[in-house]
Image (cartoon, rainbow, N blue to C red):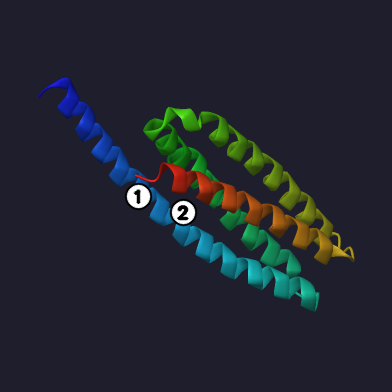
Amino acid sequence: MGASRASDSKQVGLRHRLQRIAGQVEHQHHALERLEEALRDAVARAAGAAPACAHYRDALFAHFELEERLFFPALHGFDRSSETSLIALQDAHTALRRELEQLQEHISQGADGVAPALTQLFVHLHDHEQREQALWARLAP
C-alpha cells in the first residue's frame, strides 16, 4: 500500500470517527437543553434547585470531558490549523466549570438572586456552543 493510500485511508477513518463523535456531542447538547429547562424551573420555583444544579453540573462536566478527550483531539488531528480555536474552547470549559461551581455554591447557601447568575451562565454556555458549532461547520468532513 502506497503512502498516499495509507494517508487517504487514515483520513477516511478520522472522518468517520469525527462524525460519530459529533453525533454524540449533538445528542448531549439536546440532553443538556432539557436539563437546563429543569434547572431554570427549579430556580424559578425556589424548590429543588440544589439537586437540579448538581445534576446539570454532572451532565455538563461529562459533556466537556467527551469534547476534551475525544472531539477536540479528533478535530485537531483532522485539521492542525484549528489548534488555537481548540485551546480557546478548552479554556472556556475551565471558565464555565468555575462559573457553574460558583452558581452551585450560591444555590447551596440558599441565597436569593440566583436567576440572573443562572441566565448569565446559560448565555455563556450558548455562546460557547455556537463557537464549537462554527468550528465544526468550518472543519466538517
Q: How many marks?
A: 2
Image x and y of residue 74, in percent: 40, 37
- Amino acid of disc 1: Gln
Farthest right residue in view: 112
Image x and y of residue 128, in percent: 62, 49
Image x and y of residue 27, in percent: 45, 61
Residue 74, compared with residue 118, is above or below; it is: above
Q: Say which quadrant the N terminus sits in.
A: top left
Residue 70 visible in the picture: yes
* Left or right of residue 33: residue 71: left
Image x and y of residue 111, in percent: 89, 63
Instruction: Please give the residue where the numbered disc 1 appears in the rendered image.
Output: 19
Q: Residue at x 64, y 66 (%)?
A: 36
- Amino acid of disc 2: Val
Q: Residue at x 90, y 66 (%)?
A: 112
Who is closer to the viewer here, 101 or 18? 18
Q: Nearer the viewer, mark 1 or mark 2?
A: 1
* Left or right of residue 102: residue 122: left
Instruction: Please give the residue where the numbered disc 2 appears in the rendered image.
Output: 25
